[in-house]
Image (tube, helix red, strand yellow):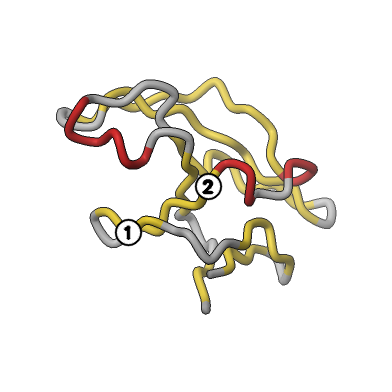
Amino acid sequence: MKAIWNKTVIAESNNTLVLENNHYFPADSIKDEYFKPSGSHTTCPWKGEASYYTLEVNGQRNEDAAWYYPEVSELAKGIKGRVAFWKGVQIEK
């Protein structure tokens, strides 16, 4: 699977985990140069607190377009160390 934004592959893996219609990519499959830590956080009642990345590709920014859970509940342990996307990031085979 590939995560693509602004015509650029920002993550690629054969080992994504699908949860709630989102592909969670292993952290080592993302291309770090495009990811900037964000100060944003949200809370999911069953997964825990999510942290976000802002994408920067070819001079354009996509605020909080990727998220991950630094710590997860027992119910969501499969997504620990994984990153998911939204805000126009396309997921393709």
Question: Which image quarter: residue 38?
Answer: top right
Residue 60 in the image: above or below residue 44: below
Q: Is residue 35 above or below residue 6?
A: above
- The residue positioned farthest toward the right in the image shown: 59
The answer to the question of whether label 2 and label 1 lie on touching residues, with beta carbons closer than 8 A, is no
Sooner in the amino-acid sequence: mark 2 or mark 1: 1
| Left/right of residue 27 with respect to residue 45 in the rendered view | right
Local secondary structure at mark 2: strand
Q: Position of residue 42 (x, y in %)?
A: 34, 27
Between the C-alphas of marks 2 and 1, the distance is: 12 Å
Residue occupying the point 40% across, 34% down: 80
Q: How many discs appear?
A: 2
- Pick the residue in front: 63 or 73: 73
Is disc 1 surrounded by few (<14), some (14 to 19) or many (20+) residues within 10 Å?
few
The structure residue drawn at horizontal position 53% and vertical position 39%, both measured from the top left corner, is 64
In the image, residue 47 lies at what x, y percent?
24, 31
Question: Whole-percent x and y of residue 93?
Answer: 52, 79
Q: Secondary structure at mark 1?
A: strand
Which of the 4 image quarters holds residue 36?
A: top right
List the single residue furthest toward the bottom: 93
Q: Amino acid at mark 1?
A: Val
> Residue 78 appears at what percent x and percent y?
32, 41
**Mark 2 Cα-neighbour bin, 10 Å: few <14, some 14–19, many ≥20:** many
Compared with residue 43, is residue 18 higher up or lower down, i.e. above or below? below
Which residue, given by chain and number where applicable, does mark 1 sit on? 18
Q: Residue shown at 29%/33% (left/top)?
A: 77
Residue at the location (73% across, 41% down)? 32
78 and 44: which one is in front?
78
Horizontally, residue 80 falls left or right of residue 29, namely: left
- The amino acid type found where label 2 is placed reads Pro
The residue that disc 2 covers is 26
